[in-house]
Image (tube, rainbow, N blue to C red):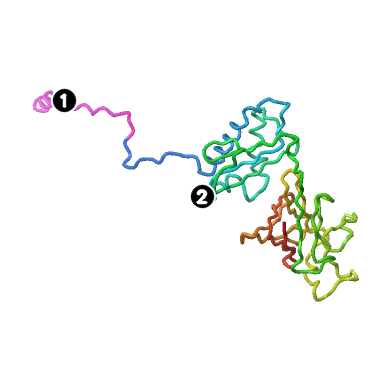
Amino acid sequence: MKNFLRKLLNNPTPVAPEQSDAAPVSSQAQPALSIPATKAKREEIIKFIINGLKPYIDEKGHTIAGLRLYILCNNKEAEETLKVALCDDTPGMFQKDHLERKLVNNFIQLAGGWFFEHHLVTDKLPDYCITHGMMGLEVIRRGQDLFQQYSVARLQVLVGQTQFPEYELNPKQQLKFSIGRTQHPKLSTGKIHTNDIVFWAQDDAAFNATTGMANLHVSRNHAYILYNPQLDKFFLFPDKGGLPENGNKIRIYTADDKVKSLNVPGVSHELQHGDQIELGGAAVLVFMK
């Protein structure tokens, strides 16, 4: 016992080393969080537009009728990012869901039916723009938004039998052009519908079974083309009878070899020269401007 006590007195219990409050250093650095490239680019564009419109903040006498955005772009990867950031595949989405609310929150006066369009350019920004870096902004004030000379376009029939082989789309005569089977079909609602681009129905006297077989796939109210006088452009919309829920479809083969389907009410396609419009997978029209 004496030996045990002597050892205990000579060798007290060692004190445990102090514990550090610092977390152990990881052998691998944690990646920094960053905003996705598309979202960052979208925010950059919106910030540029708002800064360019500072003179119009809370100016009720200077209502904006439209905006044209120009972006200098010579890189394919950057082009794809810009197209996604600007919601290129869903016309009107960037304007309504992203830009309009920010402009209103900054007390910028917008005309009813104001328009927004964007252009990717490869050489230089227009001289008349508000510019910053690679971006330019053209502001169209109320009263300056209508074109003096409206463009006239044509629709030529490639597949199917129509009342005429070619149709003129003249905005001075009308702004909306309906496309469908027979001239005055009665719809399921009981309403009599009028078509401007007429594919003959099977019971029409002029119907030809050889050339008109594609007509059987065209709905009575399949689609319509709407001219926008502010943009001087033609837009193709699906009508009720041309939607997938009614067993029909609309497909566009663009002049730059892309394929686009219209299957959502109110969502349009901006028509360009050479675009082919396929109705019901059979009848085909070509747009020329």
**Residue 50 locus on image (x, y percent):** 60, 32
Q: Nearer the viewer, mark 1 or mark 2?
A: 2
Residue 4 lies within the magenta run: yes
Q: Which of pointers 1 and 2 lies earlier in the amino acid sequence?
A: 1
Query: Foreground residue, 177 or 25?
Result: 177
> Looking at numbered disc 2 in the image, what kind of residue is underneath it?
Asn
Quick check: 6 above or below 89? Answer: above
Residue at left offset 73%, top offset 26%: 61
Name of the residue lying farthest toward the top: 9
Query: Foreground residue, 92 or 134?
Result: 134
**Residue 5 locus on image (x, y percent):** 12, 25
**Which residues lie in the magenta part?**
2-23
Quarter of the rendering containing residue 183:
bottom right
User: Horizontally, is 31 left or right of 68 in the view?
Assistant: left
As helix, strand or loop, the secondary structure at mark 1 comes to loop
Residue at the spot of label 1: 12
Residue at the spot of label 2: 74
User: Horizontally, is 206 left or right of 59 in the view?
Assistant: right
Quarter of the rendering containing residue 220:
bottom right
Indicate the quadrant containing the N terminus: top left, top right, bottom left or bottom right: top left
The crowding category of the residue bearing disc 2, from other C-alpha atoms within 10 Å (few below 14, some 14 to 19, many at least 20), is few
